[in-house]
Image (cartoon, grey):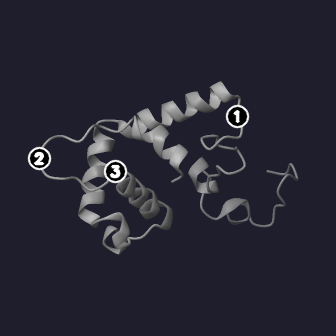
Amino acid sequence: MSDAEWEFVRTLLPEPLRGWKRLDDRAVLNGIVWKFRSGVARRDVPERYGPGATLHARFRRWAMDRRFDQMLRAAQARADAAGDVDGPVAVHSTVVSAHQHAAGARKGGFATRFPGVAPNSGSV
């Protein structure tokens, strides 16, 4: 995470409370992002990001208090204000796809249900 990105996100994170010294929020957030981007188990996250249990606890806490939603809305507002159409929060329609069965298609397809009939022949 760059310094500019961190300064933007830092203001959206909760202030540390008194008590135990917390692990750096920047390292934890980088660890959470690294874990999801790589798809590994939390026990396999590199030590530079902190213990996997800390990453998990902070992720759950921030997810439950909708901290990530606030970050996304703030990033979207900043991109909209800058006129950045293809910014980091844009989702392009060619990236989003669904398997044919997600749309309710039957198993086996047309050829299995109607053997000997060519698709789009009008003879069904």
Residue type marked 3: Asp
How far apart are the two marked residues, 2 and 1, measured between alpha carbons?
41 Å
Q: Against 52, is 93 above or below?
A: above
- Residues at marks 1 and 3 touching, judged by CB atoms closer than 8 Å: no
Q: Earlier in the sequence, mark 1 or mark 3?
A: 3
**Residue at x-position 60% and y-position 48%:** 103
Residue 113 visible somewhere in the drawing = no
The residue wearing badge 3 is 25
Residue type marked 2: Gly
Classify mark 2: residues with Cα within 10 Å, few (<14), some (14-19) or many (20+).
few
Percent position of residue 4, x then y: 54, 44
Residue type marked 1: Asp
Percent position of residue 12, x then y: 39, 35
How far apart are the two marked residues, 3 and 2, measured between alpha carbons?
16 Å
Mark number, residue 19: 2
**Residue at x-position 31% and y-position 54%:** 24
**Residue at x-position 65% and y-position 51%:** 97
Q: Nearest the camera: 37 or 46?
A: 46
The part of the image, by quadrant, that contains residue 93 is: top right
In this image, 120 relative to 53: left or right? right
Classify mark 3: residues with Cα within 10 Å, few (<14), some (14-19) or many (20+).
some
How far apart are the two marked residues, 1 and 3, measured between alpha carbons?
27 Å
Q: Earlier in the sequence, mark 3 or mark 2?
A: 2
**SS class, disc 3:** helix
The residue wearing badge 1 is 84
Q: Earlier in the sequence, mark 2 or mark 1?
A: 2
